[in-house]
């Protein structure tokens, strides 16, 4: 028996490859399925089952393509209804894989169909659980994504409490916990950077598994401070439920070079969005007017989903040479399948023929040395939790995820707005959004708040109760 966690940092997502004898099960696969097929081929094994813990909202799963390519069976838990063939496991139903057993345990709460899969080893011992979004390391899944049919998030949170205590916590302290996500995912509030643990450790460290927690306290703690889900979550969940265009067809259609003349023509049409996926420093030094920056070097796909509201948006790519296929693949992971192609020759071919724009950017030290903080406008685009922990006195906080809905609050800029995030990635995304809306009087603070903290800025400037000057 072998368990392999395949963790994708951009999505903070873990899929699982399990093999016993010459039979393989895949749990929560990514959309690009060849990696699983190649592993099975190298192991001289056959993929027998594709287990889904629930209808994922934060990425498009590869379950349909994988099942078709390998003639394997898609397994969901009870209550899952799809528009393609699946097998609905009954609560506590067992599936034989080589010498081991995978047992479906229905654990509703995050969603109604959420199911945890228990791996029982060759000796009949409970070995590991694959919990999906039911139980994370340090947290549990949010209960507000499947609200419908008269059910509220409070109802689902109550179901989750019962699932954790009646179905999971009694499986044995030694059992390994393999969740679907880690830190950075929007499927929970405060996930750990660790990608697996044991039930024993989670009972000690995870607030949701405290022994004496009542259902009322659990629900209050779970829902308190829960940010709204990204807008693409419902769209991805629908794709996972109803089906989608095969990944290979998406790649074939999108991996298309476009010469600069044709690209220029398309870029000037409101029908297309120019998406620049280079490093933020390259975007600062020169970019196509009105283009949106979301760099591949950050959490690319989740920001695409959060900020591009139309999942069917026609997209034109600007990327470094050799990064085009990666960008198309990562777009498809969150269902953005309508990439038309990429600029042949990259941004260099554009700037040789057509006008470009640049971003004004200053170092954090220059920001501190030359500016009076109580006389300028500062926009902090970090999350509210980051801002609440520590921020510059007088800075206006609009989290990047909410910026499109808050533009009226900054559209009357007369003086420059100095914009920062934590490290310099999100601030450039924000600036690209503002510039595309005609707001150009903006300055990037290079290195973000992390860099500002390393300067000689008066510590009092971080105390929201004081007036900060330099």
Image (spheres, grey):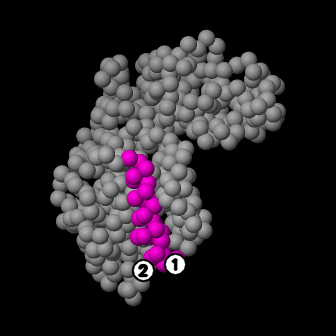
Work out whether residue 67 can be spotted: yes
Q: Which residue in the structure is indicated by mark 2?
A: 126
Q: Which residue in the structure is indicated by mark 1?
A: 174
Quarter holding the N terminus is bottom left
Percent position (x, y) of residue 414?
Answer: 61, 11
Percent position (x, y) of residue 182?
Answer: 50, 56
Horizontal side of 400 relative to 319 (left or right) equals right
Above or below 108: residue 307: above
In the picture, residue 105 is in which quadrant? bottom left
Percent position (x, y) of residue 421?
Answer: 61, 35
Q: Are marks 1 and 2 in contact (CB under 8 Å)?
A: yes
Kindly report the distance in space between the C-alpha atoms of the residues bearing marks 1 and 2. Answer: 9 Å
Look at 29% across and 70% down and name the residue there: 91
Above or below 215: residue 407: above
Look at 65% across and 39% down and name the residue there: 388
Q: Earlier in the sequence, mark 1 or mark 2?
A: 2
Work out whether residue 131 can be spotted: no
């Amino acid at each position: 028996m072998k368990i392999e966690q395949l963790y994708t940092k951009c999505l903070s997502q873990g899929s699982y490859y399990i093999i016993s004898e010459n039979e393989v099960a895949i749990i929560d696969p990514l959309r690009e399925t060849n990696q699983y097929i190649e592993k099975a081929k190298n192991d001289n094994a056959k993929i027998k089952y594709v287990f889904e813990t629930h209808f994922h909202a934060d990425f498009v799963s590869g379950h349909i393509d994988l099942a078709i390519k390998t003639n394997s069976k898609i397994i969901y838990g009870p209550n899952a209804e799809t528009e393609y063939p699946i097998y609905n496991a009954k609560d506590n139903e067992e599936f034989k894989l080589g010498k081991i057993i995978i047992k479906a345990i229905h654990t509703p709460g995050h969603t109604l169909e959420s199911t945890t899969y228990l791996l029982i080893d060759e000796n009949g011992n409970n070995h590991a659980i694959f919990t999906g979004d039911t139980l994370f390391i340090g947290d549990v899944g949010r209960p507000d994504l499947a609200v419908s049919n008269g059910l509220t998030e409070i109802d689902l949170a109550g179901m989750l409490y019962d699932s954790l205590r009646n179905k999971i916590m009694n499986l044995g302290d030694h059992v390994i916990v393999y969740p679907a996500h880690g830190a950075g995912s929007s499927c929970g509030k405060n996930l750990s950077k660790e990608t697996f643990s044991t039930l024993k450790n989670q009972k000690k460290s995870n607030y949701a598994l405290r022994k004496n927690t009542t259902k009322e306290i659990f629900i209050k703690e779970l829902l308190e401070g829960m940010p709204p889900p990204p807008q693409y979550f419902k769209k991805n969940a629908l794709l996972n439920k109803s089906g989608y265009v095969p990944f290979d067809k998406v790649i074939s259609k999108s991996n298309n070079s476009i010469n600069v003349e044709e690209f220029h023509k398309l870029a000037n049409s409101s029908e297309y969005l120019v998406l620049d996926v280079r490093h933020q420093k390259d975007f600062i030094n020169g970019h196509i007017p009105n283009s949106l920056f979301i760099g591949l070097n950050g959490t690319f796909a989740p920001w695409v989903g959060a900020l591009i509201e139309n999942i069917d948006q026609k997209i034109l790519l600007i990327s470094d040479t050799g990064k085009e296929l990666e960008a198309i693949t990562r777009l498809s992971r969150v269902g953005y399948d309508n990439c038309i192609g990429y600029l042949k020759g990259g941004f260099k071919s554009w700037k040789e023929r057509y006008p470009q724009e640049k971003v004004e950017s200053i170092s954090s030290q220059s920001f501190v040395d030359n500016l009076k903080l109580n006389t300028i406008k500062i926009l902090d685009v970090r999350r509210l939790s980051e801002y609440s922990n520590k921020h510059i006195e007088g800075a206006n906080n609009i989290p990047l995820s909410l910026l499109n809905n808050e533009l009226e609050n900054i559209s009357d800029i007369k003086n420059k707005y100095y914009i920062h995030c934590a490290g310099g990635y999100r601030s450039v995304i924000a600036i690209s959004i503002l510039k595309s809306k005609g707001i150009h009087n903006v300055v990037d603070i290079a290195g973000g708040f992390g860099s500002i903290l390393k300067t000689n800025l008066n510590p009092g400037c971080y105390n929201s109760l004081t007036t900060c000057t330099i």
